């Protein structure tokens, strides 16, 4: 294992962020002098990022905390093309208006993690948020091909995973998507020219694109650039991090309630607690090691700490405290809990009665009515904490509890409330 001198790379290594680095010694020397300006790109494909981007966000956070400069690059331009990396099919092309809306939503995801003002008194350099549309929108096609495209070998581009896997599976890859790696490499060079950026980071699927950017910087700007990727984060059981039966774990509260975010972390597998504490919280490594060593029933306390810390970092202490209290009420006292996800239904509908399977799906406890039916028939649905095996059972006013709501449960850990309006 490499021994790093800089705080930045030492922290990255100790906490499990590093998978590949183009020049570890050179980057370490730069970081020791606090001269790293690092960026990660985020395309605007939705109005919120999800937990799959959280490793990269935490890397930007540690960049800033160790005295380097962090840049969150918004893909206002590249989103119009679509990154083929890790995709089996083309991304749906979005309108400019949708991209602009998504960009504004994503901006808010970063506020809990990065300081863009630099006024917190700890000497941290202000983080930057930049939109690559600032330069990509101004590109002229022929000059771009002449000045940038000539540095890219089609032979080599065909060997990149993002291209090769599509071709091997006989899945279409548009010429538009094929250009994505040129634009990503060009982003790196533009950031180097405009802001002194010298490090690009990303997931392991971005390695080829990042290396191309490093090489392009050397060829067209004689710049010494560096690249780093993170490992693919999977759970101990092999599942991709953030993928759940209920869907994506979004960072924006309008997409996913803080309680549900808390519960995602609370349900972490025992073997993942220590690793996730290192990656997704700022807790000291000594305390993490103590929690990681817990066994048996005590590991649940470590999970509660992970859930509270992760939720506090994103949504604030008050939201984390409320989520923890709701979880305690639901799981330890059997109460409904005020922070549970809630849907409203008109009084008249409940008076007539609503099929159980429909309510379960509408509450987000199943992806579809058919899945809700199967869950109920298999004994996985409870109504007010009582088994509800009949998916066609009509749920109505008589099911409203003393707290004015109907409680639905899928399994032991997922709950929602239905309130009349």
Image: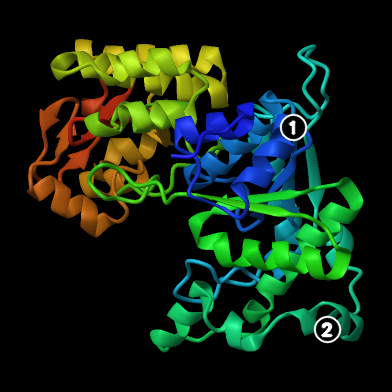
Q: Is residue 398 left or right of residue 66?
A: left
Which circle, 1 or 2, is nearer the viewer? 1
Q: Is residue 32 left or right of residue 400?
A: right
**Element type at mark 2:** helix
| Mark 1 to mark 2 CA distance (whole Å) | 34 Å
Viewer-proximal residue, 394 or 242?
242
Give the residue displayed 74% in from the left and 69% down from the top.
Answer: 183
Taking 88 as reference, is 7 left or right?
right
Q: Please give the name of the residue rendered at 27% of the width and 56% of the height, measured from the top-left corner.
A: 369
Q: Residues within 10 Å of mark 1 (few under 14, many from 20)?
A: many
Name the image quarter holding residue 140.
bottom right
Give the answer, above or below, for where 203 lies relative to 116: below
Q: Is residue 67 visible?
A: yes
Question: On the rendered structure, is 276 left or right of 45?
Answer: left
Residue 290, located in which quarter of the rendered image?
top left
**Residue 62 on image: x %, y %:** 62, 30
Q: Does 278 appear above or below 145?
A: above
Q: Residue at x 13, y 46 (%)?
A: 376
In the rendered image, which quarter contains the C terminus? top left
Q: Is residue 71 above or below residue 156?
A: above
Tell me if residue 240 comes above or below residue 109 in the rendering.
Answer: below
Residue 327 visible to an observer of this rendering: no
- Label 2 crowd bin: few (<14), some (14–19), many (20+), radius 10 Å: few
**Residue under label 2:** 145
Return the x and y of residue 161 as percentages of the image width and height: 48, 73
Report x, y in % for residue 213. Answer: 71, 64
Residue placed most toward the observer, 244 or 254: 244
Q: Which residue is mark 1?
A: 68
Which percent across, then down, holds residue 33? 76, 31
């Amino acid at each position: 294992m490499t021994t790093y001198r800089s705080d930045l790379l030492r922290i990255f290594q100790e906490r499990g962020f590093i998978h590949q680095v183009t020049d570890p010694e050179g980057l370490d020397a730069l970081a020791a002098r606090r001269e790293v300006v690092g960026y990660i790109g985020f395309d605007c494909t939705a109005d919120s990022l999800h937990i799959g981007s959280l490793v990269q966000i935490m890397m930007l956070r540690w960049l800033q905390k160790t005295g380097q400069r962090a840049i969150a690059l918004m893909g206002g331009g590249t989103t119009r093309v679509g990154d083929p990396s890790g995709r089996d099919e083309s991304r749906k092309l979005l309108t400019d208006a949708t991209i602009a809306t998504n960009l504004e939503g994503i901006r808010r995801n970063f506020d809990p993690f990065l300081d863009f003002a630099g006024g917190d008194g700890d000497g941290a350099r202000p983080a930057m948020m930049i939109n690559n549309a600032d330069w990509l929108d101004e590109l002229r096609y022929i000059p771009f091909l002449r000045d940038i495209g000539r540095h890219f070998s089609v032979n080599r581009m065909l060997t990149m995973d993002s291209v090769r896997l599509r071709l091997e599976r006989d899945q279409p890859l548009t010429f538009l998507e094929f250009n994505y790696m040129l634009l990503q490499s060009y982003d790196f060079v533009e950031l180097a020219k405009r802001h002194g950026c010298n490090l690009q980071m990303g997931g392991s699927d971005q390695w080829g694109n990042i290396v191309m950017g490093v090489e392009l910087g050397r060829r067209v700007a004689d710049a010494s650039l560096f690249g780093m990727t993170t490992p693919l984060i999977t759970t101990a059981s092999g599942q991709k991090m953030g993928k759940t039966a209920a869907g994506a774990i979004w960072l924006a509260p309008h997409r996913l309630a803080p309680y549900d975010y808390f519960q995602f972390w609370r349900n972490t597998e025992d073997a993942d607690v220590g690793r996730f504490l290192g990656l997704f919280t700022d807790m000291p490594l000594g305390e993490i090691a103590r929690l990681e060593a817990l066994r048996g029933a005590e590991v649940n306390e470590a999970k509660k700490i992970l859930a509270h810390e992760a939720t506090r970092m994103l949504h604030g202490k008050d939201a984390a405290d409320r989520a923890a209290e709701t979880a305690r009420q639901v799981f330890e006292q059997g109460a409904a809990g005020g922070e549970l996800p809630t849907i409203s239904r008109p009084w008249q509908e409940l008076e007539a009665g609503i099929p159980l399977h429909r309510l379960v799906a509408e509450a987000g406890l199943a992806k579809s009515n058919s899945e809700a039916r199967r869950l109920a028939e298999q004994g996985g649905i409870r109504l007010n904490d009582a088994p509800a095996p009949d998916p066609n059972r009509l749920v109505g006013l008589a099911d409203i509890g003393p707290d004015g709501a109907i409680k639905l449960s899928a399994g032991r850990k997922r709950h929602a409330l239905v309130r009349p309006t």
